[in-house]
Amino acid sequence: MLTVTEARERILSHFSANPTENIPLASARNRILAADIFADGDHPPFDNSAVDGFALRAEDTSASSVTLNVVADIPAGTTPKVSLQPGEAARIMTGAQLPHGADSVIMVEDTGAQHHGTGTNAPNTVTLAKQMQAGENIRTSGSDIRAGEMILKQGRTLKAQDLGMLAVLGVAEVPVYQKARVALLSSGDELLDVNEPLQPGKIRDANSYSLAAAIESAGAEVIRLGVAKDTRESVTHLLNKAAEASADLILSSAGVSVGAFDFIKEVIDSNGKMDFWKVNMRPGKPLAFGKYGGIPFIGLPGNPVSAFVGFEIFVRPVLERVNGQMDGSRRTVRVRAEAELHSDGRESYLRAKIRNENGAYFATLTGHQGSGNLLSLVQADALLIIPAGVKCVPAGEEVDAILL
Ligand code: AMP
Ligand code: MG
């Protein structure tokens, strides 16, 4: 029997990061950055005003009221043509470039109120209600970012705010890893698609939907192959389609145990090689790994919870590696058991609900932990990990939990 870590390491050793491609910035959200990004220059690129108001020389101001001549009007997006002399000011808008000679900007609210409002012309003079310090209300060039500074690291999952930053830096084409592509099939004569009415002896195919969504949530692309019947021909047909699609991974569920109609192992062996492992874990002890037509193959157990847990433990890390992702999409936290937890001694993944009390997490099981019971997984927001060899965790003790 393999430990979970051994099984995962064995699988991972067959994968490496995909080649990279350049894509338009607008479509880069959730893609994985394939190079470090450095600042192209100083940002902001020029000294500018942080407020709507009047640019001036602080030394011209005093505690008592002062009136300055307004010699220019500087909207955002223009370059000022004046250089302020003693006793002079320029009306200026937020984000507009500071004129030469100015060292501060007084907010319009701190001047004669008549200059307020959209569409008003710059006045000839401005009266100040307060004394200014040099540097006040100015964003100096390079105060946010210095030219050459490292801004975003290779392997990062690009978020909305990262796209804004890449725009600031002028990165129109973003280097990213090509997405992992996963050919997905379910197997079993008992499976019906969601839009078919139930029939005697049949159930609906859950895994095609949960696993496809899980693949997408890991930033990979799904090639949906549907359901293989429990015949050699049907299994062969779908695996050949997977090979033709030159996927990075073929992922199946069910049909790999020792049942009389489990043809997957036989078909894979005919055009590659398959190992059948027992992994010291619950749920999901049986795990198949091999290659078909040169493409790595992972066979998850059929029970919907085992398939889901198997995906999280073995497949998500594979997709992270192929996608070049360094910031994993799942977080593990320490949680305290509300009540005693039990295991049979295998590394166990228990479905639980987490609550946060003053910064500490507490976990309660969501109910029946059978490997076919999808409801308790739906109700859970974490998988508690009971380490191998531990049969009982007393109430109040801490365990690791993977947040879902
Ligand atoms: P098997 O490995 O083929 O013996 O399947 C194990 C169990 O998982 C059986 O009860 C199957 O009916 C169930 N099962 C297999 N595939 C699916 C699926 N795609 N959706 C829901 N249940 C499934
Ligand atoms: Mg089956």
Image (cartoon, grey):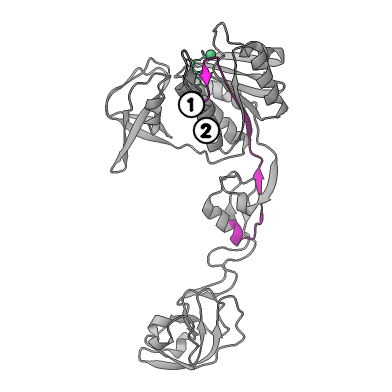
Q: Is residue 187 magenta?
A: yes
Cβ of mark 2 under 8 Å from ligand 1: the answer is: no
Q: Is residue 133 visible?
A: no
Q: Is residue 153 left or right of residue 136?
A: right
Q: Is 230 above or below relative to 54? A: above
Percent position of residue 305, x then y? 45, 23
Residue drawn at (69%, 48%) of the image:
22
Q: Marks 1 and 2, Cα distance to the nearest angstrom? A: 8 Å
Quarter of the picture containing the C terminus is top left
Percent position of residue 84, x then y? 55, 89
Q: Nearer the viewer, residue 212 or 160?
A: 212
Percent position of residue 27, x then y? 61, 50
Cβ of mark 1 under 8 Å from ligand 1: the answer is: no
Residue drawn at (54%, 7%) of the image:
259
Q: Is residue 367 left or right of residue 243?
A: left
- Secondary structure at numbered mark 1: helix
Furthest residue in direction top, as rendered:
260
Q: Is 16 above or below relative to 76? A: above
Q: Is residue 372 visible?
A: yes
Q: Nearer the viewer, residue 256 or 347?
A: 256
Name the residue type under label 1. Phe
Name the residue type under label 2. Ala
Residue drawn at (60%, 66%) of the image:
42
Percent position of residue 383, x then y? 41, 29
The span picked out in magenta is 166-194
- Look at mark 2 in the image and give the residue it sits on: 214
Q: Nearer the viewer, residue 28 or 208?
A: 208
- Secondary structure at numbered mark 2: helix
Q: Residues within 10 Å of mark 2 (few under 14, many from 20)?
A: some
Check if mark 1's residue and mark 2's residue have beta carbons within 8 Å. yes
- Look at mark 1 in the image and give the residue it sits on: 308
